[in-house]
Amino acid sequence: MDRLKGKVAIITGGAKGLGEADARLFAAEGARVILTDVDETGGARVAAEIGPSAQFIRQDVRDEAGWRDLIATVMDRYGRLDVLVNNAGVVEPGTIETTSAEDYRFVMAVSADGTFFGCKHAIPAMRASGGGSIINMASIASIQGESLVAAYCAAKGAVEALTRSVAVHCAQGRMNIRCNSVHPSGMDTPMVRRFGGKVAAAGLAPPPGASPHGASPLGDATDIAWAVVYLASDESRFVNGQRIVVDNSMSVTSGHVPSAG
Ligand SMILES: NC(=O)c1ccc[n+]([C@@H]2O[C@H](COP(=O)([O-])OP(=O)(O)OC[C@H]3O[C@@H](n4cnc5c(N)ncnc54)[C@H](O)[C@@H]3O)[C@@H](O)[C@H]2O)c1
């Protein structure tokens, strides 16, 4: 119940999906939660349902000036910042040959730029708070080749690599700030529920034998939220610069060969 007691946490993309599950679990574990999103209706609904320990603030994570305002508002109202979950992300279907420059830049802007700005502006506030934990939402798309989401793979690879750089920067500066990435496989969220339709609309179909896992079941958003709670809590105080894969073995499955048919 009290694994995050006394902590102040920002969760981006908190209006639905994994961010919503994080926000609900963080509050249940005693944190005060600021959830942000471009979806004002969804974000306000989630904050109201959680109750007084949650607040919604509209934010587009692509906007660096908005990050400065958000961190200043949180420090003003709460006096500290202990946790940042860089969770907001988008996916657009497309292989390396079919992805438009516009889609590539959009996906990179939300996941990679948004995470970059978040880390950059959270660190001074966490330093002033005596330390903190940054959790960056990556994906198994940064670990394995996923041909249908080329831009998404690039964005999540950037998130993973940035995570290590931030972790080492903070460790070398003795800041007591940790930074880790979380890598889910397919989870049952609005993003994933929409994705099949988007793939079909783009005229793409998975190549034969594309999935090493066959019919892998989708995980639940809470399966990821428990990992995020662990990284946000002091239980993980010696875990820094790591990627935590939560994928029910999908990324380590081997021995698959495309079928002859
Ligand atoms: N669901 C999965 O299977 C899965 C797997 C691996 C990684 N992830 C990652 O987890 C994170 C959450 O995914 P999800 O499945 O919950 O997605 P989702 O689409 O269900 O929810 C994402 C939320 O982010 C918000 N958002 C989008 N662009 C934004 C922006 N510019 N600024 C602020 N908020 C913005 C959306 O409005 C939405 O509320 C993403 O980074 C995603 O890439 C998800």
Image (cartoon, rainbow, N blue to C red):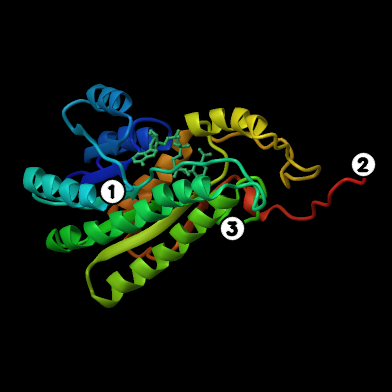
Q: Is residue 30 visible?
A: no
Identify residue for label 1: 63
Residue located 22% across and 39% down the image: 34
Q: Which residue is mark 3?
A: 143
Q: Earlier in the sequence, mark 1 or mark 3?
A: 1
Q: Position of residue 141 (x, y in %)?
A: 57, 51
Q: Which residue is mark 2?
A: 261
Quadrant assignment for the C terminus: top right
Query: Looking at the picture, which amino acid does disc 3 mark?
Result: Ile
Label 1, label 3: how far apart the Cα atoms are:
28 Å
Distance from the alpha carbon under mark 2 to that under mark 3: 27 Å
For marks 1 and 2 on the same chain, the one whose residue lies earlier in the sequence: 1
Q: Residue 59, how many percent across, how many down?
A: 26, 40
Kindly check if marks 2 and 3 are in contact, taking CB atoms under 8 A apart as contact. Answer: no
| Mark 2 crowd level (few <14, some 14–19, many ≥20, 10 Å Cα) | few
Count neighbours of disc 3 (C-alpha within 10 A) and say few if under 14, some if 14 to 19, many if 20 or more.
Answer: some
Mark 1 residue element:
loop
